[in-house]
Amino acid sequence: MLLLFAAFSLLTGAALLALSLWLRSRSQQCLQWPSVTGHVIESRVDDTHLDMMKPVLRYRYEVGPQSYIGFRVSFSGYVASRSAMEKLIKPYSQGSAVTVYYDPQNPSSAVLNNTQTSDWLYWLAFGLGFLVLAAYLTWL
């Protein structure tokens, strides 16, 4: 049974480590992305299911002849409180014009804030914690 938990911890740790490195890489890359003007089409806190409350932000933008719908403010997460979610979406009211930074290699990937620091260190710490737990469980 311990080996099963060790394997689960190893896989979880590896996944969180990969996520943290991806977030770090993307948050650095988006500093160089070109921008276009887009428009917010939806901005609200979805509290239909209180246990799964989340901010909902969608914006439309065009790169060349192609139209896209984006949803990401930045490559950072958000706090789980309603007030934090409202603060996150407040600058992006429905119908407002926004600057959209998009990946020139994949224009469907975009952010509204390309300077916000990613929370990659948070995920790195959790990933390393799970890897340490896996090592500990393996040597018991």
Image (cartoon, rainbow, N blue to C red):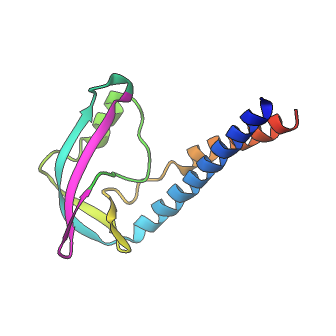
Along the line of sight, the residue nearer the viewer: 60 or 90: 60
Task: Magenta stretch: give its range.
Answer: 52-69
Q: Is residue 47 left or right of residue 23?
A: left
Q: Is residue 82 left or right of residue 123?
A: left
Residue occupying the far left of the picture: 95
Image quarter where the C terminus lies is top right
Along the line of sight, the residue nearer the viewer: 67 or 123: 67
Measured from the top left, where is residue 65 in percent x and y?
17, 75
Is residue 54 within the magenta segment? yes
Q: Quadrant of residue 107?
A: bottom left
User: Mostly what secondary structure, the magenta segment?
Assistant: strand
Along the line of sight, the residue nearer the viewer: 23 or 107: 107
Q: Residue at x 21, y 54 (%)?
A: 59
Image quarter where the N terminus lies is top right
45 versus 49 height, above or below? below
Q: Residue at x 34, y 30 (%)?
A: 53
Q: Is residue 29 left or right of residue 7?
A: left
Measured from the top left, where is residue 108 in percent x and y?
31, 64
Residue occupying the far right of the picture: 139
Measured from the top left, where is residue 91 in percent x and y?
23, 46
116 versus 43 height, above or below? below
